[in-house]
Image: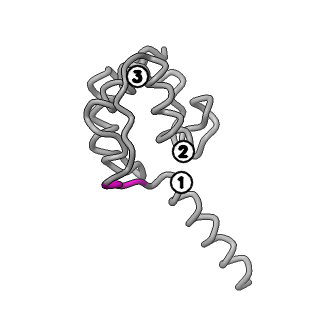
Amino acid sequence: MKKKILALLMGTSLVLAACGGGNDEGAETTDTAGTGDAAKLYENKCSACHGGDLVSGSGPDLDRIGSKLSQEDIEKVILEGQGAMPKGLLDENDAAKVAEWLAEKK
């Protein structure tokens, strides 16, 4: 029984660590333009929870998010967080790029 609880706690910790983030002061920033860069930002900061293909992660599917939320709404979620998603994973410029890219997913 103790092994099962330990395994559950370890698994949960790994998932939270992958989705977590924070302000990594001094960390390298990605301040670039274009949809390829938005996809790269997504891959680096979002795909651990939402899946590399926008559907196979532990977080909500994003493959059709543009048909549900506006670009502004997506950007707000990215900046402020929602549910288990923490805020501050991307700065304002990068959040705008990723939101624009995701809003096209309909």
Please name the amino acid that badge 2 sits on.
Answer: Cys
Q: Residues within 10 Å of mark 2 (few under 14, many from 20)?
A: many
- Residue 93 vs 27, above or below: the answer is above
Query: Tag count in the figure?
Result: 3
Please name the amino acid that badge 1 sits on.
Answer: Ala
Gap in Å between the C-alphas at discs 1 and 3? 26 Å
Q: Residues within 10 Å of mark 3 (few under 14, many from 20)?
A: few
Residue under the image location 26 percent in, 24 percent down: 72
Gap in Å between the C-alphas at discs 2 and 3? 19 Å
Q: Residues within 10 Å of mark 1 (few under 14, many from 20)?
A: some
Residue under the image location 27 percent in, 30 percent down: 93
Q: Are marks 2 and 1 in contact (CB under 8 Å)?
A: yes
The residue where tag 1 is placed is 18
Q: x%, y% of residue 65? A: 45, 24
Disc sitting over residue 49 in the figure: 2
Disc 2 element: helix
- Residue 18 vs 99, above or below: the answer is below
Name the residue nearer the viewer: 101 or 40.
40
Predominant secondary structure, magenta span: loop
